[in-house]
């Protein structure tokens, strides 16, 4: 009996998966690609919801107490996380990914929001996220380190291929876009795109009537011919501005989350990046 028990323990330790819980979709995506079947991955912010507006539930705490790793994107994006980590003594399993990427300050940030949290939209940062997750998984599960290294290497190769495609944005005729909320600063920096935004750093920070009138003027004056809206926020203002200025409106995803349907259909982070590129090229007159 004792022998059987020891054997079962051994089997259990061989097949045990690393249990990882992530907050926003880009983190989920990276862990999924690097961990594959060696990881049991929990998604905290439900698919199909606006990530800035998330509030944790008691069930989320239960999930976190059973996790080996809890990866958050930043205290700007997930202002609720710190309190939960402290109250449940999760410091040892918690990683704040913003400490491992290059973050940028923003001129329009509100008090208490020290930096722009949308860093995953810079490919260099997304690659840093992959490397960090690779290190974390190797640390937790050294016996599978070769697998994690291989998965990370393959994924980085795919990321770099799309990064090369994005380089064409540098030669577009129109370098100005209007987006729904202030999420594309990193992308703008990488490809020299000027981003005008309708809402603030979070989609619920709405502009005044005067600011809306200014955006309509900018759209006309700067020859902008697409106003972008996003899937999980109200598209009324984007569509109003587009209509008033006589231009198109189209969806552009900041990839803070994906829809339930996209998740079911195995749509990946890089698929959405590629879709965004097609739309950006159209809006920016590049060929
Ligand atoms: Zn955002």
Image (cartoon, rainbow, N blue to C red):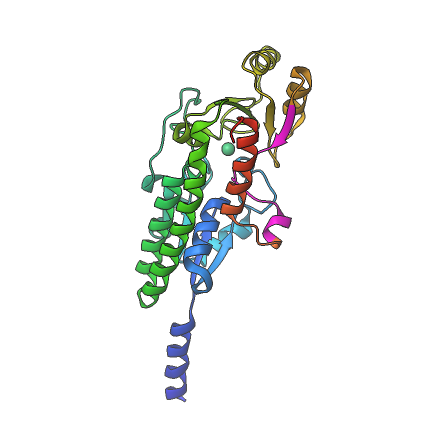
Residue 145 drawn above or below residue 123: below
Q: Nearer the viewer, residue 93 or 153?
A: 153
Q: Residue furthest front?
A: 287
- Residue 148 location in percent, x, y? 36, 60
Q: Position of residue 36 (x, y in %)?
A: 45, 61
Residue 48's place in the image compared with 254, above or below, is: below
Q: Where are the magenta residues, as a range? A: 248-263
Question: Quarter-wise, where is residue 127 in the image?
Answer: top left
Q: Residue at x 62, y 54 (%)?
A: 264
Q: From where the camera sits, is residue 271 visible?
A: yes
Quarter of the image that includes the N terminus: bottom left
Rendered residue at 43%/53% (across/down): 31
Q: Nearer the viewer, residue 279 or 268?
A: 279
**Which is more toward the observer, 160 or 124?**
160
Measured from the top left, where is residue 35 in percent x and y? 42, 59
| Residue name at image x 46 percent, y 55 percent | 32
Residue 261 within the magenta-colored segment of the rendering: yes
Residue 229: in magenta span: no
As drawn, 111 above or below 13? above
User: How many numbered markers are drawn?
Assistant: 0
User: In the rendering, at what x and y percent does residue 67 appear?
Assistant: 43, 57
Q: Is residue 253 visible?
A: no
């Amino acid at each position: 009996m004792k022998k059987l028990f020891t054997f079962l323990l051994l089997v259990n330790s061989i097949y045990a998966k690393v249990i990882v819980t992530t907050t926003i979709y880009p983190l989920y995506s990276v862990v999924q690609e690097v961990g594959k079947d060696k990881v049991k991955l929990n998604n905290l912010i439900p698919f199909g919801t606006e990530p800035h507006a998330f509030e944790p539930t008691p069930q989320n705490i239960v999930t976190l107490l059973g996790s080996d790793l809890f990866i958050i994107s930043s205290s700007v994006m997930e202002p609720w996380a710190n309190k939960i980590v402290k109250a449940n003594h999760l410091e040892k399993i918690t990683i704040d990914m913003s400490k491992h990427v290059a973050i940028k300050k923003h001129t329009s940030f509100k008090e208490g929001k020290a930096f722009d949290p949308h860093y995953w939209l810079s490919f260099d940062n997304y690659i840093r996220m992959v490397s960090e997750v690779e290190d974390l998984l190797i640390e937790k599960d050294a016996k599978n380190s070769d697998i994690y290294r291989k998965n990370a290497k393959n994924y980085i190769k795919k990321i770099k291929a799309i990064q090369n495609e994005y380089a064409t944005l540098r030669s577009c005729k129109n370098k100005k876009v209007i987006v729904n909320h202030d999420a594309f600063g990193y992308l703008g920096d990488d490809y020299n795109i000027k981003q005008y935004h309708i809402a603030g750093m979070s989609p619920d920070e709405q502009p005044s009537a005067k600011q809306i009138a200014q955006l309509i003027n900018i759209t006309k004056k700067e020859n902008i011919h697409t106003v972008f809206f996003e899937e999980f926020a109200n598209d009324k203002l984007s569509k109003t501005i587009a209509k008033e200025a006589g231009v198109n409106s189209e969806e552009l995803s900041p990839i803070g989350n994906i829809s339930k349907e996209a998740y079911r259909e195995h749509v990946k982070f890089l698929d959405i990046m590629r879709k965004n590129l097609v739309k950006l090229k159209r809006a920016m007159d590049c060929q």
